[in-house]
Every structure is written in C-alpha cells, then in structure tokens.
Image (cartoon, grey):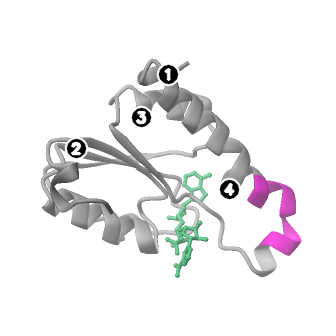
Amino acid sequence: MGTENEYEGKVVLVTGGAGCIGTNLCKKLAELGAEKVVILDDLSSAYEWNIPRADNISFVHGSILDDEMLKRVYKEKPDYVFHLAAHFANQNSVDNPAEVKTTRFHKIDTTLFLFCKKENLC
Ligand SMILES: NC(=O)c1ccc[n+]([C@@H]2O[C@H](COP(=O)([O-])OP(=O)(O)OC[C@H]3O[C@@H](n4cnc5c(N)ncnc54)[C@H](O)[C@@H]3O)[C@@H](O)[C@H]2O)c1
C-alpha cells in the first residue's frame, strides 16, 4: 500500500469496496487518515451492513458499468483508485464469460481514462 502516510488527506475511490478485500482496505484507508474514501459497489455479491462506517467513508450504490455512476464518483476527484469490483470467478466466469470480462477489464479503460483526464494526463 505504499508508505502509510501516503493516504493521509487524500481522496480514494474503491470500486468493489463492499467486498471482502474492499471492506478491509477501506477500513485501513479511513484509519490512515484519508480525507475521504468513496466506495462504488453494486452490492451484487456484498451486503450493505458489511460496509465499514466512518465519517470519512461514503458509499455510492451503483455499478462501474454505468458511466453516469463513474462520472458521479470521479467528481470527488480521487487521488487514488483501487479497482476491486469483480464478479466472483470460477464457475461464474464459465457461465457468464462476457459479463465477467467486461467488469474486470473493459471498464478499467473507463476508470483509467477518467483518472487521466482528472490528472490532465490526456
Ligand atoms: N479474495 C481473495 O483472496 C483474492 C485474492 C487475489 C485477488 N483477488 C481479487 O481482488 C478483487 C476483489 O476480490 P474480493 O475477494 O474482494 O471479491 P468480492 O466478491 O468479495 O468483492 C467484489 C465486489 O465487487 C462488487 N461488484 C461486482 N460487480 C460490480 C460492478 N459492476 N460495479 C460495482 N461493484 C461491483 C461486488 O458487489 C463485491 O462487493 C477481485 O478482482 C479478485 O479476483 C481476491
């Protein structure tokens, strides 16, 4: 995760932040003093009650496949983005290969593009 104080005062977007890794990551980021941890999760395989609560954590219920939702969370101007939104693989990736691939890979293009735009890199 880099140096511990790297996240202090920063805005961090965590897609899939309500999941197994995401909830623990968000808790840690909040403890490390992130100004704001923004979670974007469609709760397709997670529960709202499991999302960590803190003044500096905000939850947006939506999908990374929805461009309007992505624009909404990028308005927070994240300094860091952790892309953890994913469908549980194994049999699911055999049954729904296109959907699993879209969530994991295709939308990374959009999140990266919006991030680069925000940083004036493109
Ligand atoms: N758990 C592990 O041991 C492990 C190990 C190595 C890598 N990973 C990888 O880390 C990532 C996260 O894993 P995890 O164990 O936390 O999975 P998880 O299933 O617990 O969390 C994924 C989250 O993504 C959300 N999600 C799914 N599709 C979404 C969408 N379209 N928009 C928004 N949110 C969406 C789900 O609701 C869920 O909360 C995955 O890419 C996984 O392959 C996990």
Name which residue type carries label 2.
Answer: Lys
Real-space Cα separation, disc 1 to disc 2, in angstroms: 23 Å
Question: Residue 91: image x %, image y %?
Answer: 80, 80
Q: How many marks?
A: 4
Real-space Cα separation, disc 2 to disc 3, in angstroms: 12 Å
Residue at x 56% of width, y 36% of height: 112
Q: Is residue 33 left or right of residue 94?
A: left
Q: SS of the residue at dot 2? A: strand
Quadrant occupied by the N terminus: bottom left
Residue 7 image label: none
Read off the residue under disc 4.
104
CB within 8 Å, label 3 to label 4: no
Residue at x 30% of width, y 60% of height: 2
Residue 73 image label: 3
Read off the residue under disc 1.
121
Q: SS of the residue at dot 3? A: helix
User: Image quadrant of residue 86?
Assistant: bottom right
Name which residue type carries label 4.
Answer: Arg
Question: Residue 66: image x %, image y %?
Answer: 62, 36
Read off the residue under disc 2.
36
Q: Residues within 10 Å of mark 4 (few under 14, many from 20)?
A: some
Q: Residues within 10 Å of mark 1 (few under 14, many from 20)?
A: few
Q: Earlier in the sequence, mark 3 or mark 4?
A: 3
Q: Is residue 3 left or right of residue 116?
A: left
Residue at x 13% of width, y 50% of height: 55
Q: Which residues are magenta?
A: 93-101
Q: SS of the residue at dot 1? A: loop
Q: Is mark 4 within 8 Å of ligand 1?
A: yes
Name which residue type carries label 3.
Answer: Val
* Foreground: disc 1 or disc 4: 1
Name which residue type carries label 1.
Answer: Leu
